[in-house]
Amino acid sequence: MEIVIVGAGVIGLATAWRAAAGGAAVTLVDPSPMSGASSVAAGMLAPVGELTYGEEPLLRLGLASRDRYGAFVAELEELTGLDTGYRTDGLVQVAFDADDLRYLDDLRRFQESLGLPAEALTGRECRRAEPMLAPGVRGGLLAPRDGSIDPRRLGTALLAAAERFGARLVRRRAARIVVDGGAATGVGLDDGTVIRADRVLLAAGPWSADLEGLPPGTVPPVRPVKGQVIRLRTRVPFLRRTVRGLVKGSPVYLVPRADGEVVIGATQEELGFDTRVTAGGLWELLRDARELVPGVTELEFVEVTAGLRPGSPDNAPVMGPTALPGLIAGTGHFRNGILLTPVSADILSAMLLDGPVPEIAGLFSPDRFSAEVQA
Amino acid sequence: MDKLVIAGEELDSRLIMGTGGAPSMHVLREALTASGTELTTVAMRRVDPSARGSVLDVLAECGIRVLPNTAGCFTAGEAVLTAKLAREALGTNWVKLEVIADEHTLLPDPIELVEAAEQLVADGFVVLPYTSDDPVLAHRLERIGCAAVMPLGSPIGSGLGIRNPHNIELIVERANVPVILDAGLGTASDAALAMELGCDAVLLATAVTRARHPARMAAAMRHAVEGGRLARLAGRIPMRRYAQASSPFEGLATS
């Protein structure tokens, strides 16, 4: 079985690893692996902390992925000898003022109605858990099983794992889908060469619909949603676990890592393919982070980046066979790509290799948007 | 239902929607459809008109007219520039004019608002200003040529409803342009009250987009606006201190 995967972000890489390990000859096509949202993402693994009304299917997928994460990372680190910065020390969600606390109470009731353990904390308890929090925080919620991972380390390890099983990386841009007899039979690169394949996986995030030769409506509308993210560094113990906060209704998070990195995110902007970092974006992130954790302004500045999340109409990923035989979609992971990597790799590699596909995949099929206009 | 007329344009729906706070494009589409709205406002500083799959595409596919707004502007200068960019990008000279005084209350800055409105009216815009519930200011905005006035019920996104119904009535009494209650509505009865007070339309976003079931709340708002409008046209009875039997006691059958 010859497989071409367009896009070497975490979804493409993890699927390449699983498919190559399953015996397929895999070629990854990406001019610059891990250059999209995967390298900007903070890496929160927070299906519970990020729960939204009406997105219960996404919650189920997120929980399924979180449950797979421990074994997934253990296998990956064992195989490659690389550390991924995986942590399972929970996530504390904090309310800055009384309005924010009312919102968190509502979220807690929603979590409980879905059978999820949610521990309500007073402001004092929040600060006992995280002493760097501002004295004025009103209360919070602890999601004890949420966690985080370093997406850049994860990407490096996934590429090494895929290559260990013989996957080949071609650093070129995929320009077109090759269609013969009504089926996808390969990918044409920007230098004119063609890589033939039995199956093609489209995992190019918000660029997935850009390939020439895609029949109209093949790929559901996935749009870029910009996020700006700041990376800082601390030399002293700072936060024990991920802190997510609402500050006067505006969400912000701080993700600490064992190596001293602290990631602050993220804006959510509908501005097309724009990756400019803006003064206002930085200001809002730092303003809200400082309200929650005043000491944050003492940390060393490392980097600021903007990435484009692939957003589908219902915020959930688009995974499965498309209307073009031989072409499988694996995009639309939006705010949850890092969290959803293990389960997506299992689903997509099973689809590529005709193996048993996890049942939950049926909720994320590309044809669910048939009533809406396709890209 | 009688038609709403703004700047000579007729609309069958008296519910104008906003898009802010929608959890996803799919939910937004369902909510807009359920609301029956024909006019929806979009923050021009938050969208790129050339991007595909954006909220503007959702509106186009639903056949809903776009009302660009200047949310996020703190000065008349920014608001005027944003309105001009919107006119260029979307080809409409309608604008919901928003000039905010501070991020804490999001209340309008009346002085900057009047300044921006004057400039935009002079430049040929159809200006729909988001204003406080001050009858004097509302009248002033009408006098300088605004096509409607949009007083708030309470601060944006607060869901506190109409905190000063008396002022809204005063604005309605004096206005010769449509009065659109904008901001602060929390649930259907708030929208019905706005219409009963004599407002010509209601503009809301958060009450729907952040509801547990946005499409259901959108339908509730649609019915509330229609119900409130009908009640206004029907004319409510005067309030009485004591009961008055709806059927007469006199002339009942006696032996």
Image: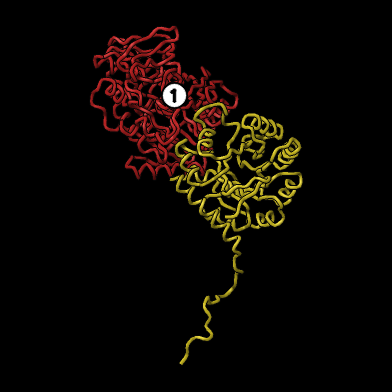
Q: Nearer the viewer, residue B246 or A116?
A: B246
Please identify the residue farthest to the bottom as the structure is shown: B255
Q: Residues within 10 Å of mark 1 (few under 14, many from 20)?
A: many
Position of A42 with respect to A79 (left or right) is right
Q: Amino acid at mark 1?
A: Ala
Residue B74, image x, y percentages: 67, 35
Residue B190 visible, this orientation: no
Q: Nearer the viewer, residue A105 or B176?
A: B176
For mark 1, give the secondary structure.
Answer: loop
Position of A164 with respect to B236 (left or right) is left
Residue B102, image x, y percentages: 64, 38
Position of B4 with respect to A232 (left or right) is right
Residue matched to label 1:
A42
Residue B93, image x, y percentages: 67, 36
Residue A322, image x, y percentages: 35, 26
**Chain that is coloured yellow in the picture:** B
Residue at 49% from the left image edge and 38% from the top image edge: B22
| Chain to which the residue tagged by mark 1 belongs | A
Residue at 29% from the left image edge and 20% from the top image edge: A352
Q: Is residue A26 above or below residue A341?
A: above
Residue B34 visible, this orientation: yes
Q: Nearer the viewer, residue A261 or B104?
A: B104
Position of A49 with respect to B28 (left or right) is left
**Chain that is coloured red in the picture:** A
Q: Nearer the viewer, residue B75 or A153?
A: B75
Residue at 37% from the left image edge and 27% from the top image edge: A339
In which quadrant will I find the N terminus of chain B? bottom right
Q: Is residue A98 above or below residue A36?
A: below
Q: How many marks?
A: 1
